[in-house]
Amino acid sequence: MRSGLKNIHDRAGIHFRVCRGGGGRVIPKVSGCCTDVGASGGASGRNADWRRFWGTTSAASGSLRPRGRIVETLMLTSDILSFASGSIRGHRLRSSLTIVGIAVGIGAVVVLTAIGEGVRQFVLGEFTQFGTNIITVTPGKTSTFGVSGAAIPSVRLLATEDAVALSRLTAVSAVVPVVQGDARVEYRQRSRRTTIIGVSADMPAAWKMRVAVGQFLPNDPFDSARAFVVLGSKMRDELFGNRSPLGARIRVGSDRFRVIGVMESKGQMLGFDLDDTVFIPIGKALELFNRDGLMEIDVTFREDDSADAVARALKGLLLARHGQEDFTIKTQEQMLSVLSHCWWGRSVLRQS
């Protein structure tokens, strides 16, 4: 009884008869290759014709030479491709849906990856406008950005004395104590509430901002600063229009300040409009908002220094002053990492 016989034409047009033996190997029929299993002389004749067609490395081993292996591989590959193409043609709808599903999956991955990269680049661009060598110190020991000192009365607040001490470190190039709040700004018949930021004279260098007209706040002692004010570009336009604001006196909250400068337009940073602000000395801001401590201290360092090394120096100095780690130090790399995850999650929620 013959097992698994069929006719095959190779690409050159040579006619074969294929026998699938007990071992599963495909054997071309050449001059009586395939014989009845168990027939007299069948095995020896088949092996002889097999060796003549395929060739062997030696008469003793009977192993295939490279020509035989290549021909057999081509025949098996041809069978597999023929079977696969036949299955696709026989199930066209199923095959089409499978292709569409794969395409949709790949497209979704590409789109989500592009969105994530876009968010990362956006956050990076928003923060690098303040430079790449800035470290933020906030009151309270937390795992993120810290919280306002007013919320934790048992913790020692950051004081202007801390900012002065940090400025004495050799690796530090600028220190900006920050207090922020809202107050009404008035000039003659025009008034409205806006953001008031109390800073030091190092703010333009630390935040990469420039003065368009006049000058920035002078380097007065924090506890005895003069009542000077610098306007954002938008506030200048709303209060003074095309007139020069230099030397004019405006009311900020309950105090009167003299305008000595106007900042160049900086735009928005994560939704916060820096042009719609008023900058006053940090000591005056503490009095205006009746605060005992700072909201944060921004520290910039030299480009050739490591952010981690500077952060360790800041931590050591503040530990010596406070006696405990009741503050949080964040490098820009850490802030970018946290904000990237926040914006990514926010974007995904908006799309869902």
Image (cartoon, rainbow, N blue to C red):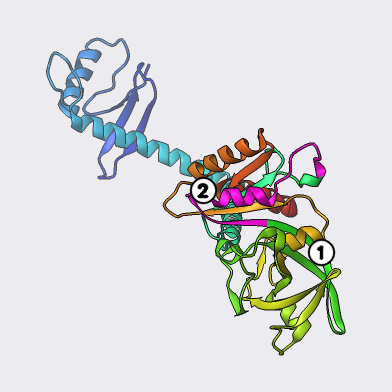
Q: In the rendered view, does 314 fall on the left or right side of 53?
A: right
Around disc 1, counting alpha carbons within 10 Å, would you say few (fewer than 14), some (14 to 19), or many (20 or more)?
Answer: some
Which residue is painted at 81% across and 46% down in the image? 150
Q: Nearer the viewer, residue 73 or 40?
A: 73
Residue 108 seen in the figure = no
**What residue did someone put label 1 on?**
182
Residue of label 2: 169
Magenta stretch holds residue 170: yes
| Vertical comparison of 205 with 305: above or below | below
At label 1, the amino acid type is: Asp
Drawn side of residue 262 relative to residue 99, left or right: right
Residue at the location (85% across, 74% down)?
Answer: 192
What residue do we see at 75% from left, 83% from top?
Answer: 248
Judge by depth and name the residue closer to the eye, 260 or 272: 260
Q: Amino acid at mark 2?
A: Leu
Residue depth check, mark 1 versus mark 2: number of the one nearer the observer:
2
Question: Depth check: 330 or 46 in front?
Answer: 330
Per the rendered image, the range of residues in magenta is 151-177
Residue 228 shows up from this direction:
yes
* Quarter residue 12 falls in: top left
Identify whether 7 is placed above or below 207.
above
